[in-house]
Amino acid sequence: MIILLTVVMITGFSLKISAENKYFKKQVTTVVFNESKGIISNKIEERDSTLDLKSGNRGLSVLESLESLEGSEFYFKKHSGKNNWDNDDNENEHTRTNNRFRGHWAGIEFGFNNYVTEEMNTVMPSDIYYMTLHSSKSSSFNLNFAQQSFGFTHYIGMVTGLGINWNNYRFDNNNNIRKGDNGVIEELNPLAALEKSKLTTIYLTVPLMLEFHVPANNHHLNIGAGVIGAIKLGSHSKMVFEDGNKIKSFGDFSLSLLRYGPTARIGYQNFQIYGTYYATPLFKPGKSPGGYELHPFEIGFALTFND
């Protein structure tokens, strides 16, 4: 009886061990993905409760028990120093980012504008005193909505794009301007006290700049210079009287349809200081006030959206 009971217990224990091994001995599926082709291969291996997945340069082992950890292909490769998918993927991403040059144009700009005579003087001659501007209230706003960069290296490239430029020329005296005989610009005297008076121009701008990036504290300084061209979209004058009445007049005011000039900017990351001078006079040839050519310019700061 004792021998019989012993044989029965040993047989039952063996069956239990066999059943447990059969339960934990599972097929392991290794699946390899490709971003463009999807699944390119799969492999079924016998391993204790482990599912190995590989997508691109990333590996993942799903373990049902810690006993399977040392046998995992990805565990071995990660900790043996022979391969590391996470590091490789980060390095590849870092390389792709570093090889891409991105200029600084798209964004918004705020500044001040004015104009100078051919002698580069902001003080107007006495016979066109009415063209004198209130400098601190003559403002500009630019919306640069499109950008294209062409990199020669990671640190040098060309930048172009599109933008819209608003210039407000705020007159300092109690006057405005109008288009007189033969389109010549002359003084407009409202014969009443003005609170403010200005001329507004709107241009579509197209830059072409060479830009350099100088590494600094894990970021970079950027220096750009080139030319900017523009085509007039519209213009108007506005007078606000002290009694609250307003007069707004639309017209071309003999303004130059096309204009161009040098532009430059310097900044750190997404913040820049810029300046633009237009070699083309503000008014058409032969139409400027008093026969003086007035060249517009603006200076200000920019916040770009490229990084």
Image (cartoon, rainbow, N blue to C red):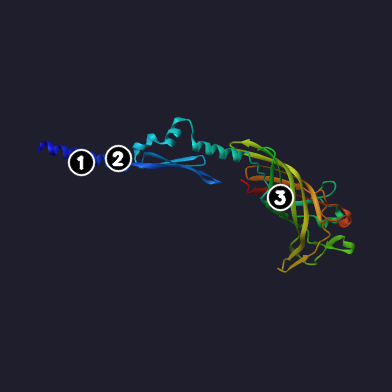
In what element is the residue under mark 3?
Answer: strand
The quarter holding residue 262 reads: top right
Amino acid at circle 2: Asn
The quarter holding residue 176 reads: bottom right
On the picture, is 20 further left or further right than 11? right
On the picture, is 106 further left or further right than 258? left
Answer whether labels 1 and 2 touch (C-beta < 8 Å).
Answer: no
On the picture, is 184 further left or further right than 76? right
Relative to 253, say whether 17 is above or below.
Answer: above
Residue assigned mark 2: 21
Residue assigned mark 3: 161
Please tell me which residue is depicted at 82% across the width and 64% down the height of the picture.
189
Most extreme residue toward the top is 81
Q: Nearer the viewer, mark 2 or mark 3?
A: 2
In what element is the residue under mark 2?
Answer: helix
> In terms of depth relative to the viewer, which is nearer, 34 or 226?
34
How many marks on residues? 3
**Residue 105 % position (x, y):** 68, 48
Residue assigned mark 1: 12
Ranked by sequence position, the earlier of labels 3 and 1 is 1
Ranked by sequence position, the earlier of labels 2 and 3 is 2
Ranked by sequence position, the earlier of labels 1 and 2 is 1
Query: Within 10 angstroms of label 2, few (less than 14), some, or many (20 or more) residues?
Result: few
Residue at mark 2 to residue at mark 3: CA–CA distance: 68 Å
